[in-house]
Every structure is written in structure tokens, then in C-alpha cells.
Image: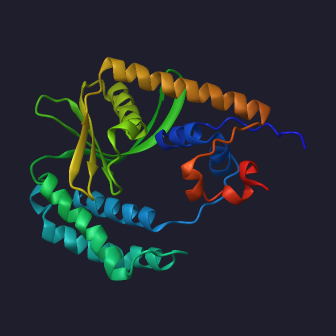
């Protein structure tokens, strides 16, 4: 059977760039064929924590307290996330354990920074722009301004902080947001930062011109490779340890016996 060409997608996202570079075939299944993947406990936990912090920053600065965060968490759990948790096809934690893991992340957030001490200029801010002509769409968790009116782009993470040799993908993604927001606002970048809430630690990055050039090259190269794959209908399979966690392993040609 001959490969079937695909229409080029309208845009890339920071996460889809990582997916394509990890395995073009997985990108095809997820983004072009749109074969749904079941939700996982870490995904639901991350979304729950993100929404708590999103709603926290909708409050006036002096109301962004841990007590109010607890009220927000309880309301969101009852209204939405209890059902999301109980609908999971596979659970690794009891309900109490799951809720404690989520609240642990929120408690760590309050240790990491004081949300009453600054204003967020953007929360869940949609970014729709381009880098070197490559269309990019994504959502920034939060951005704010430093005392000298420079951009601080912040992204919450509820997973483990990767070792330095494995952090390029996360560093690239936050850099993409920094480049897009700098272009949109005309303001200089102070830093991009990842808040690893599980461990209560930061990863902060100086988005230098060298870093921008490296990210621009990665974005451009990914788009060019995607164009070739879509035109030919041929998507490479890249096998490795992550295949064991891939929901498409059963239909992947690299794993067909």
C-alpha cells in the first residue's frame, strides 16, 4: 500500500515540536490521524494543579493566600476534577493520595514564591505567532514584568525535574514562548522559568541571542522535516525506551511482528 500524503498542519506547538523530534510516527498518529490517547493520572493531576493556580491569580493580590487556594482546590475538585479522576482508565493512587499529591504541589508553590507580591500580566495567555516564518500556537501559563519592565515567562511543571543532559526539550519550549512574547510586546526578556512544583525547585534560563538562534534552527528544521513527511506520507519511526509508554505501540510498524 502506497503512503498517502497529508495536508501540512496550520501550526506547530512547542510540545508538538518535541513529539515530532522524538518520533515522527507518533506525531502522525496523534496530530494528523488524531487517534485519541487515554488520559493518565499525571496529566489529570497537572491540569488540576494548573487550574488551581490559574484561578488563584484571578484574585486580587492580597487575596492570593494558601487558605483561598485550598478553597479553590475544593471547589474545582467537586465541580470537575473528581469526575476526571474517577473516569481514568488506570489509577496509580487512591483518591486521597491523588488529592494529597496535588496539594503538595500547591503548598510547594507558596514556598517557592509569594503570589501577593506581584501581578501577572497574562494567565493562560494564547500565543499565535511565528518564528522564522514557522506558524506557532501555544498557551503560556503565566507572564509578568520584572522591576525594570522586562518579561518573565513562567511555566508550571508537576512532573520530575529532568537531569541537565535531558532538559533541552523543556528549555526549548519555554524559549519559544519567550521569543513569541518578546516579538508581540516589543519588550526585552528578563528570563524564562520553569517551576517544578513537585520538588519545589526552579529552572531559570537566560534567553540569550545564542539560545534564540538554536531554538529558531530547531523550529525551522522541524517544520522543514514535517513538510517532507507530509508531502511523501512517510513518517519515520524512532524506537527507544520511551516506546514502552507509547499508546500507539500496538499499531506502530516498528513493533508489528
Q: Residue at x 78, y 37 (%)?
A: 233
- Quadrant of the rendered image containing residue 200: bottom left
Q: Residue at x 37, y 81 (%)?
A: 95
Looking at the image, how many numbered discs can be counted on the residues? 0
The correct choice, above or below, for 196 with respect to 207 in the image is below
The correct choice, above or below, for 65 with respect to 135 in the image is below
Q: In the rendering, at what x and y percent does residue 142 appear?
A: 29, 46
Q: In the rendering, at what x and y percent does residue 164 appear?
A: 33, 38
Relative depth, front residue between 252 and 70: 252
Q: In the rendering, at what x and y percent does residue 248 appear?
A: 66, 56
Image quadrant for the C terminus?
Answer: bottom right
- Quadrant of the rendered image containing residue 176: top left
Image quadrant for the N terminus?
Answer: top right
Q: Residue at x 51, y 28 (%)?
A: 219
Relative depth, front residue between 39 and 117: 39
Relative side of 36 to 217, left or right: right
Relative side of 2 to 50, left or right: right
Q: Residue at x 23, y 63 (%)?
A: 106
Relative depth, front residue between 97 and 242: 242
Protein image colouring = rainbow
Relative depth, front residue between 172 and 77: 172
Relative side of 133 to 97, left or right: right
Q: In the rendering, at what x and y percent does residue 253 appear?
A: 76, 49
**Which residue extends farthest right?**
1
Amino acid at each position: 500500500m502506497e503512503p498517502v500524503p497529508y495536508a501540512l498542519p496550520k501550526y506547530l506547538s512547542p510540545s508538538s515540536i518535541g513529539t515530532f523530534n522524538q518520533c515522527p510516527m507518533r506525531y502522525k498518529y496523534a496530530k494528523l490521524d488524531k487517534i485519541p490517547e487515554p488520559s493518565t493520572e499525571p496529566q489529570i493531576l497537572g491540569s488540576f494543579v494548573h487550574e488551581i493556580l490559574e484561578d488563584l491569580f484571578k484574585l486580587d493580590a492580597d487575596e492570593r493566600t494558601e487558605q483561598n487556594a485550598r478553597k479553590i482546590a475544593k471547589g474545582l475538585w467537586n465541580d470537575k476534577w473528581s469526575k476526571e479522576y474517577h473516569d481514568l482508565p488506570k489509577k496509580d493512587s487512591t483518591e486521597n493520595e491523588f488529592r494529597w499529591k496535588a496539594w503538595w504541589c500547591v503548598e510547594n508553590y507558596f514556598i517557592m514564591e509569594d503570589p501577593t507580591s506581584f501581578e501577572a500580566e497574562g494567565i493562560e495567555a494564547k500565543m499565535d505567532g511565528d518564528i522564522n516564518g514557522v506558524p506557532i500556537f501555544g498557551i503560556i501559563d503565566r507572564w509578568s514584568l520584572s522591576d525594570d519592565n522586562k518579561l518573565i515567562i513562567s511555566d508550571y511543571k508537576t512532573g520530575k525535574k529532568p537531569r541537565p543532559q535531558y532538559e533541552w526539550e523543556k528549555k526549548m519550549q519555554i524559549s519559544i514562548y519567550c521569543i513569541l512574547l518578546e516579538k508581540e510586546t516589543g519588550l526585552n526578556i528578563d528570563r524564562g522559568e520553569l517551576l517544578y512544583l513537585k520538588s519545589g525547585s526552579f529552572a531559570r534560563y537566560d534567553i540569550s541571542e545564542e539560545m534564540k538562534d538554536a531554538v529558531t534552527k530547531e523550529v525551522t528544521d522541524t517544520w522543514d522535516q514535517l513538510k517532507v513527511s507530509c508531502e511523501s506520507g512517510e513518517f519515520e519511526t524512532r524506537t527507544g525506551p520511551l516506546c514502552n509508554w507509547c499508546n500507539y505501540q500496538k499499531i506502530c510498524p516498528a513493533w508489528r511482528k
